[in-house]
Image (cartoon, grey):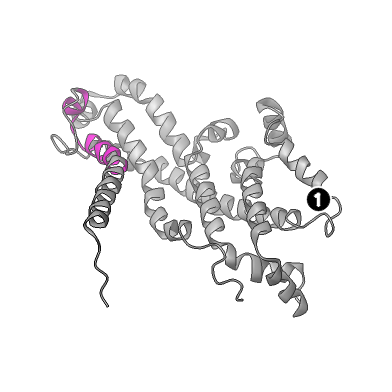
Amino acid sequence: MVYKQSLSRRLFSLANVLFLSCITLLGIIPFLHLLSVSLSTNVAASAGEVKLWPVGFSLDAYEYLGEKVEFFRSLWVSIERVVLGTAVNMILVFLTAYPLSKSNDLFKWRTPYVWFFAVTMFFGGGLIPTYIIVKDTGLLDSIWALILPGALNVWNMILMLNFFRSIPKEMEEAATIDGAGHWKTLWQIYLPVSLPSIATIGLFTVVGHWNSWFDGILYMNSPDNYPLQTYLSTLIMSLNTQMTSISVEQLEALENLSEKTLRTAQIFMGALPIMIVYPFVQKYFIKGMTVGSVKE
């Protein structure tokens, strides 16, 4: 039997599709504009003539960024930071959230530990004390200076904690009857059914590490150790000085380059990796968290 939709239902579906399409366009159009400006000439970009299509196609901004060895070195630092930082952050979140998700009967000192972590969300040691600790522990000019100071994100830990608490107790009880300890229960029971939460927190962590730039300036004495966002930020700040010191031949070669085109190229390149990763984890945002975990 074929179900025939009513006219009102079809109109609602059409209006819903049109509305969501408009929302999608509102999210895509800014990136198209950024890309168009970065691929346009200096005159067109400065005059505001660029909309959604490049005016006077030019790759000077990307050539200026890509021809430098420093760019690829900083790109590798960012990739290394994202991989190591995300791994450390997620492991610590799992190992902290799991015991704190237990009831007070199973973990007697659970509440004081939760408050111990929660206080750090509202009060911090400050910039100078943190820098002194990083310096005295010998982390300056190393990749770990970008990872260890924020190794455990308490907000992400609380999100994972609350998700663990929502997992049916029958699953853990069944694992315990089969002889599984806490370690095996965490890695073989809790984490497999937590993929939606893991994907969400993992994406937030990746974005945070990729977009962070200030700690690179703070903890790295050598520009060779700058992550990509720090390198691009310093490049933008020093662009005007470089423009006044280059030769006439270099100036003619970069006639289509300006601060605006370079800045938009920076923003687009900084957002591109996340735009590539997001579609692969999007399905977990709408996937049922514990659907099918327990059968009646």
User: 176 and 136: which one is in front?
Assistant: 176
For the point 68% across and 27% down, which residue is it? 126
- Which amino acid lies under the numbered mark 1 shown in the image of this protein? Arg
Q: Which residues are magenta?
A: 27-46
Q: Is residue 60 magenta?
A: no
Above or below, 167 relative to 110: below
Residue 68 on image: x %, y %? 36, 40
**Regarding mark 1 in the picture, which secondary structure is present there?**
helix
* Residue 194 lies in quadrant: bottom right
Residue 229 on image: x %, y %? 45, 38
Label 1, residues with CA under 10 Å away: few <14, some 14-19, many ≥20: some
Query: For this view, does 39 lie left or right of residue 181?
Result: left
Residue 276 on image: x %, y %? 37, 53
What is the quadrant of the N terminus in the image? bottom left
For the point 74% across and 72% down, which residue is it? 173
Q: Residue furthest left?
A: 56
Q: Is residue 79 visible?
A: yes
Above or below, 19 relative to 218: below
User: 131 and 50: which one is in front?
Assistant: 50
Q: Main secondary structure of the magenta part?
A: helix
For the point 65% across and 63% down, which residue is it? 167
Q: Is residue 63 visible?
A: no
Q: Which residue is mark 1?
A: 110
User: 177 and 51: which one is in front?
Assistant: 177
User: 213 and 274: which one is in front?
Assistant: 274
For the point 72% across and 34% down, which residue is it? 133
